[in-house]
């Protein structure tokens, strides 16, 4: 298993520190990096951990390793295909972004571009501070384009998001938004957006839960959720209408899934919950379990994202699979188009999610 620190895996912290030194000019183009033995001493890390950090930087296109000669900063990155940046704070904490970013990195290499990663090496900072730091890193590195997943679940998220995109816009750096918009549905920002079709996903998931026999469902979300959540909520409401249920304020529940009073309220009011994501569903399922409420016998459940642990819960979770690899591919192509033709109108590229039916909703698998 990789060595971990309080700020995430050690190899990522090391890669981030060397990355910053390359982008700030401490190591210039063509410069030779210290040997692995020297880096082992500097970071008090094992040699496999150092090798893993260097592989990450090589994967991003920032360095090249020459047999018998050493490790060097790659030359003339901008002339080969440019430098792309990622602003995804807490990257390692959100499962869907790992495959999205891996696909973007693959497409970047195919087009001769380098990709500057960042995120979970800064776990000691708040998400908004991480996002601002990553933006400054992209500005200092003079990136040719930035992929940005706007902040969610934090106070003043809208102000920070707007400040970030305004800084990038003033610098003339194209922005492609991932997974969520800056604006809440039905508004749209003036930037390209690549995501799952969350409205359709919300409709299909809720339609299935209702078809399984639910009569009094609730849509569960957290305060300050992302714009994609409100699209899922809109799909939820449309499915209610299809089944002859007039959407009311009571159908939308905003709260903390780890708060016992909130869990008790849901048990009292609902016979089904459609959760904003699998993580919320997992926390709620644990809360139901503590109160002796059985899924799906007493209450049906569903989520979004199809994370790895969705099948490992006490009752496997019905959910919507995010087309992460396809999102990454589409985002990379959108960035290439945006760099080539900056005057293109802002586009919204939506990919269809797949309904994954499991035991938690109490219905038969399709």
Image: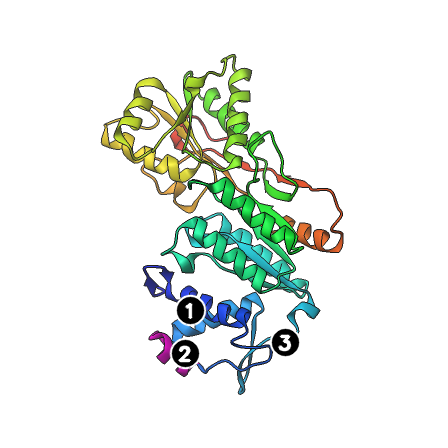
Nearer to us in this view, 262 or 129:
129
Predominant secondary structure in magenta? Answer: helix
Which residues are drawn in magenta?
36-46
Q: Which mark is first along the chain, 1 or 3?
A: 1
Quick one: label 2, few (<14), some, or many (20+) residues within 10 Å? some
Q: Which residue is denoted by mark 2 in the rendering? A: 39
Label 1, label 2: how many angstroms apart (C-alpha)? Answer: 9 Å
Tell me which residue sits at (65%, 64%) in the image. Answer: 113
Toward which corner of the image does residue 299 lie, by quadrant? top left
Q: Does residue 115 appear left or right of residue 293 in this picture? A: right
Q: How many marks?
A: 3
Quick one: label 3, few (<14), some, or many (20+) residues within 10 Å? some
Percent from the top left, x then y, of residue 47? 38, 77
Tell me which residue sits at (38%, 31%) in the image. Answer: 360
Quick one: label 1, few (<14), some, or many (20+) residues within 10 Å? some
Badge 2 element: helix
Percent from the top left, x then y, of residue 278? 41, 38
Toward which corner of the image does residue 79 lie, by quadrant? bottom right
Q: Which residue is denoted by mark 1 in the rendering? A: 14
Q: Residue furthest bottom?
A: 68
């Amino acid at each position: 298993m990789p060595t971990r620190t309080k700020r995430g895996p050690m190899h990522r912290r090391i890669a981030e520190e060397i990355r910053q030194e390359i982008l700030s000019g401490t190591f210039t183009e063509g410069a030779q990096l210290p040997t692995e033995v020297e880096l082992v001493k500097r970071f008090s890390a094992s040699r496999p951990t150092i090798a893993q950090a260097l592989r990450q930087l090589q994967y991003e296109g920032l360095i090249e390793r020459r047999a018998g000669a050493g490790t060097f900063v790659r030359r003339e990155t901008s002339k080969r295909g440019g430098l792309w940046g990622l602003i995804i704070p807490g990257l390692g904490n959100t499962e869907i972004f790992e495959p999205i970013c891996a696909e973007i990195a693959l497409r970047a290499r195919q087009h001769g571009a380098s990709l500057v990663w960042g995120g979970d090496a800064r776990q000691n900072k708040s998400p908004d501070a991480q996002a601002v730091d990553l933006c400054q890193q992209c500005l200092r590195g003079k990136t040719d384009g930035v992929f940005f997943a706007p902040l969610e679940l934090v106070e003043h998220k809208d102000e920070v998001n707007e400040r970030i995109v305004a800084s990038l816009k003033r610098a003339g750096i194209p922005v492609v938004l991932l997974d969520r918009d800056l604006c809440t549905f039905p508004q749209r920002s003036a930037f390209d957006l690549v995501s799952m079709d969350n409205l359709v996903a919300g409709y299909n998931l809720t339609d299935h839960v209702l078809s399984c026999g639910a009569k009094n469902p609730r849509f569960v979300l957290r305060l300050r959720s992302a714009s994609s959540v409100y699209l899922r909520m809109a799909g939820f409401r449309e499915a209610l209408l299809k089944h002859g249920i007039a959407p009311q304020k009571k159908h939308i529940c905003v709260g903390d899934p780890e708060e016992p009073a909130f869990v008790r309220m849901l048990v009292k009011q609902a016979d089904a919950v459609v959760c904003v994501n699998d993580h919320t569903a997992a926390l709620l399922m644990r809360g139901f379990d503590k109160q002796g409420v059985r899924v799906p016998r007493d209450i049906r459940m569903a989520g979004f994202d199809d994370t790895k642990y969705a099948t490992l819960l006490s009752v496997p979770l019905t959910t919507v699979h995010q087309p992460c690899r396809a999102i990454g591919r589409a985002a990379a192509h959108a960035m290439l188009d945006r760099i080539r033709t900056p005057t293109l109108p802002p586009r919204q590229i939506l990919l269809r999610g797949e309904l994954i039916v499991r035991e938690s909703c109490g219905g038969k698998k399709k």
